[in-house]
Every structure is written in C-alpha cells, then in structure tokens.
C-alpha cells in the first residue's frame, strides 16, 4: 500500500488513493503415475497449464506482477479502480511459452448508482486478453514493466469503448516470502502428484492507465 504525490489530471481527484502491488514467481511440477501396469496418464488437460496429450508429467513455471490503483473524484461521487496484471509462463515438455497482460477499469458513481467495467478482452467471445506492447520481468523479483495499449470492452455490451494506454513499472522492495506445497491424489489405477514452489515480494507500482476521457487512472496520491 503506497501513497504518492498527485500530479495534475484532466479530472480533479482527491489527494487520497491506494496502490496495491505485488510480484510472484512460481514453479509447479505435476505428474500422473499409473499403477497396476497401466499406461501413464497425462498431466494437465481440462484447461490446466499442461499440454494435452503430454507425457507422464509436466513443469509449469510462471512469473507475474499485479498492481491495483484506486481513486475518488473531488466531489466524492466517482470511485475508480484500475488494475493491471502481467503474466509470463513456460510449460515443459514442449517449452510452450505465453505472455498475457490483463487490464481492468471499474467506475462506480455513488451519487447516481451507475457502474461500469471495462476489460481488454471481448466478454462476448473467447475472453482472451488483447495487449499491443511488451511485458518484461527482472530475474529476482526486483523489477517488472508493461508498455503498450489495450482495447477496452464494456463488459455489459461487449462493445469496444476506447483504447487504454498502459505503461506501468514495478519495483520490488523488502524481503521475499516463499510458499512450498505438495498435493497427492490416489484413485483406482492412478496416482497424481503435484509440487509447487512460489515466491512473492511486495512492490511499488507507478505509471499510466488511461480511461475513456484520457485521465490517468494509475495516478494516485
């Protein structure tokens, strides 16, 4: 949770705001082992991170950065929440890599009751985020960044309302926290083993996420 000096905006905002930011790296090992001499089943499937059909096991490595910016208009009516999440993953075997940047802007008017949410994917189609730009990560949860633009769709209608300029930089600080977990499930003829190791670190985030009026919703006090 960070507080920063506010700069001039197209729309006046109160000198009150909250930023939440975190960076996370994770490794997940998953495997199905057949018992009774049967052929080993594949890990993943069903929308999981591992390919189908895979071998008897897979490794899923990922790193992501998340930031959430909340502001209130000067008249106390309009509450805006803008968030961005950058995600990179590598799945083995196959060395299948993917990069995703998810952007969301929600606006609630407490005086009129109006509520709007915009996201960078068409909610009426496949729901896969579209981002035109780059997403970069440091090697030790020290830095991360996104730089580009995203078409923003109204979640109620599926209509593209505007294009948001998104430029956010994360800077990690403080100690890291590591979480290690193992998961085992035995059924008739098979055994599923999963091991995960994830490390997280708090971060400062700053930059730009523009709304339909061109205001920077990532600018908070």
Image (tube, rainbow, N blue to C red):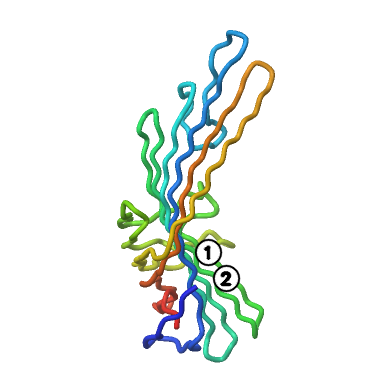
Q: Position of residue 84 (x, y in %)?
A: 45, 62
Q: Position of residue 17 (x, y in %)?
A: 50, 80
Q: Are marks 1 and 2 in contact (CB under 8 Å)?
A: yes
Q: Position of residue 138 (x, y in %)?
A: 31, 55
Q: So how many labels did they put on this image? A: 2
What is the spatial separation of the Cα atoms under label 1 and label 2, in whole angstroms? Answer: 7 Å
User: Which of the image's four quarters has the C terminus?
Assistant: bottom left
Q: Earlier in the sequence, mark 1 or mark 2?
A: 2
User: Which of these two is toward me, 70 or 126?
Assistant: 70
User: Which of these two is toward me, 148 or 142?
Assistant: 142
Q: Label 2, secondary structure: give it.
A: strand
Q: Position of residue 100 (x, y in %)?
A: 41, 51
Judge whether 70 appears above or below 151 on screen.
Answer: below
Q: Count residues near mark 1 (Cα–Cα under 10 Å), then give few for <14, some for 14-19, many for 20+.
A: some
Q: Which residue is mark 2?
A: 116
Query: Residue at image x 46%, y 80%?
Result: 3
Q: Is residue 148 left or right of residue 86?
A: left
Residue furthest to the front in view is 175
């Amino acid at each position: 949770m960070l507080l920063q000096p506010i700069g001039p905006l197209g729309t006046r905002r109160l000198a009150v705001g909250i930023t939440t930011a975190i960076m996370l790296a994770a490794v997940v090992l998953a495997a199905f082992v057949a018992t009774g001499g049967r052929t080993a089943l594949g890990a993943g499937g069903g929308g999981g991170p591992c390919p189908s059909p895979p071998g008897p096991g897979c490794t899923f490595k990922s790193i992501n950065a998340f930031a959430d910016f909340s502001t209130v208009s000067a008249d106390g009516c309009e509450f805006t929440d803008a968030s961005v999440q950058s995600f990179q993953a590598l799945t083995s075997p196959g060395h299948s890599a993917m990069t995703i940047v998810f952007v969301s802007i929600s606006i609630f008017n407490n005086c009129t009751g109006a509520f709007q949410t915009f996201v960078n994917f068409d909610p009426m189609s496949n729901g896969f985020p579209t981002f035109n730009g780059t997403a970069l990560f440091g090697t030790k949860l020290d830095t991360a960044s996104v730089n580009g633009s995203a078409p923003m769709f109204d979640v109620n209608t599926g209509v593209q309302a505007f294009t948001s300029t998104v430029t956010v930089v994360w800077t990690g600080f403080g100690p890291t926290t590591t979480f290690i977990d193992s998961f085992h499930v035995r059924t008739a003829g098979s055994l599923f083993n999963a091991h995960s190791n994830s490390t997280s670190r708090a971060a400062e985030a700053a930059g730009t996420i523009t709304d339909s009026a061109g205001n920077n919703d990532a600018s908070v006090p």
